[in-house]
Amino acid sequence: MHPYVVVYFLRNFMKIKLTLLLLIVLFSCKTDPNKQIDEGKITGNKYHSKEIGWTMEIPKGWNFTSKDIMEERNKKGMDAINETAGVEYTANELKQLLNFQKDNFNIFQSTSEPFALGYSKQWEENNAGLKKLIYKTFQQNGIKADSTETKNIEIDGLVFQSYKFIVYNSKGEVILNQILYSRLINGLDFGVSINYNNESDKKEMLDAWFNSKFKK
């Protein structure tokens, strides 16, 4: 299994696991938001990544997520995936890009990591493997979840692969939705994860994300 699958899984599943188990309390970042990201620049309500060529406006009323929180999520997520897969992987090259949240359940997260293609369709195969790995980890942790089919979503002329997980409580009620978007850009595995538990916050995040601009 390519380490890419683990790293990509890490940056998404860990948020669900932590939210469900209430392992940490998220907080608003009141300091310079540019100190909370590994790449790119935040000016006012706009984020720009030079490496990705990505520009996105940040919705009003949302808080930047602290790097301390992101590092804690990384550690918890890596522990979870290592336990599930029986492997030892690290995320040394993973970069935190734009990350913000409304509360513990409504979160926007984006990351990038180098991905060198060894053969045609390798990235697509790894993305498919990621989906299976997430579902397997849900099962092994006693979490009931469903997933949708993988779809191609176009944003500013670029096609992203996307799929969704729906997480339930013991009564069969939906408690969290997670949509994943990913694409290989400039030799980087670029991913966006949107977690939500209500339609209003979902719309705000999706509107901002779908109005992103990418340098061609």
Image: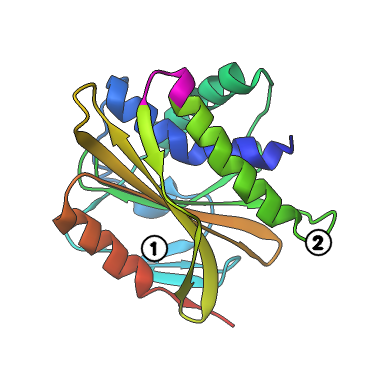
x 57%, y 34%: residue:
133
Q: Which amino acid does label 2 sit on?
A: Ser
Res 27 quadrant in image = top left
In-front residue for pair 17/46: 17
Q: Give the range drawn in magenta.
A: 139-143
Q: Which of the labelled discs sits on residue 120, or is there none?
A: 2
x 22%, y 62%: residue:
203
Q: Would you place residue 123 above or below residue 129 in this image?
A: below
Q: Which of the labelled discs sits on residue 42, or is there none?
A: 1
Q: Does the magenta stretch include residue 8?
A: no
What secondary structure predominates along the stretch shown in magenta?
loop
Q: Image quadrant for the N terminus?
A: top right
- Looking at the image, is mark 1 or mark 2 earlier in the sequence? 1
Per the image, label 1 sits on a secondary structure element best described as strand
Give how far across and how far down residue 116 sits, in percent: 78, 54
Q: Image quadrant for the C terminus?
A: bottom right
Q: Would you place residue 107 above or below residue 182 in this image?
A: above
> Residue 78, can we see it?
yes
Q: What residue type is labelled 1?
A: Ile
Q: Residues within 10 Å of mark 2 (few under 14, many from 20)?
A: few
Q: How many labels does the image show?
A: 2
